[in-house]
Amino acid sequence: MNMKNRLRLPLGAQFWANDGSVIPEWLCPHMIDRPSHNGAFMIQTPLGRARVHKGYVVVEHLGNAWCRPPGELSELLLGIEAEIAPGSASIGPGKAAAFGHRSKAKKAKPLGGERKKSFRRPIGSMPSIEWVHVADLSVDQSYQRSIDNEASRRLIAGIAANFDWRLCAPLVVSRRPDGSKVIIDGQHRWAAAVRRGDLPQLPCCLFTYDSPEVSVRADRYPRQRHGSRSSTFVIL
């Protein structure tokens, strides 16, 4: 008996597991990009973008798509059932209340009568943390510093020879409008992975910028404000 037969799906819900099978037509409108080398791809959910990794499950209900690893699927279905139950509040399966049916918490009073501060809306869109195939990453030579020098070659050789996942922070990557993924920070780690040949994927933090020039400023900003990255912690 497969997973779908074991589950109790709400009426009208669609189900698909990313097991290498053909992507169903109902899922295509929710897809943001095509499957990568490792079979993963992005979809749009009511809570933002989500990465459908190999082995993950996608459920669609009432025009909304949700993505979960198999271990969290039962919780998702409980949330969907709570949303459509008679007399229930329309809180959606992505909200915490739908998964635990928690009672409404009382609002905390401001300390000392202080008014709640209002902040300007965050600038830009939230980044996504993804495993990206090294072949899908590139470097924009028009602004990125060159690694074609003796010091960089020694550094890359040392990283490749003594690669340690515990020291490999996620690469900072710009997602361009044409679909390319351009490295902003981490090209030495990327070059070392390419050199080894046995590290097909690297963890990446993908940002969407309005233009390449904005991504250049983002690359320089941490160093201007906090000093050299290497002075804060050691990364490969």
Image (cartoon, grey):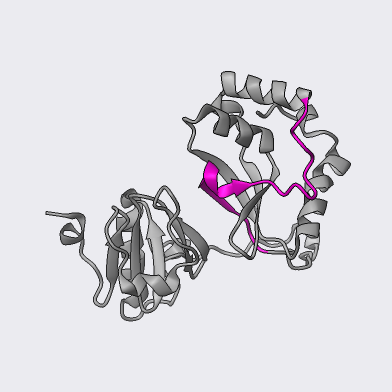
Residue sitting at x 36%, y 50%: 54
With respect to residue 164, does 223 lie above or below?
below
Does 136 appear above or below 161?
A: below
Name which quarter of the figure residue 80 lies in: bottom left
Single out the residue that lies furthest toward the right. 224
- Residue 182 image offset from top left, x and y in percent: 66, 51
Q: Give the residue drawn at x 73%, y 61%.
A: 110
State which quarter of the image contains the C terminus. Answer: top right
Q: Residue 141 in magenta?
A: yes
Q: Is residue 123 visible?
A: yes
The magenta region covers: 125-149
On the question of residue 100 being in view, the answer is: no
Q: Residue 26 vs residue 167: left or right?
A: left
Is 104 within the magenta?
no
Left or right: residue 44 versus residue 215 is left
Could you tell me which quadrant the N terminus lies in? Answer: bottom left
Residue furthest to the front in view is: 148
Question: Where is residue 121 drawn, in percent x and y?
Answer: 74, 68
**Residue 186, horizontal then vertical, whole percent:** 67, 38
Q: Nearer the viewer, residue 143 or 208?
A: 143
In this picture, is 87 found above or below 186?
below
- Left or right? Give the position of 120 relative to 67: right
Viewer-proximal residue among 136 and 83: 136
Residue 31 is drawn in which quadrant? bottom left
Left or right: 27, with 46 as reference point: left
- Where in the figure is residue 38, as x and y percent of width and height? 41, 47
Residue drawn at x 36%, y 65% as measured from the top left? 79
Q: How many marks?
A: 0
Q: Residue at x 59, y 24 (%)?
A: 160
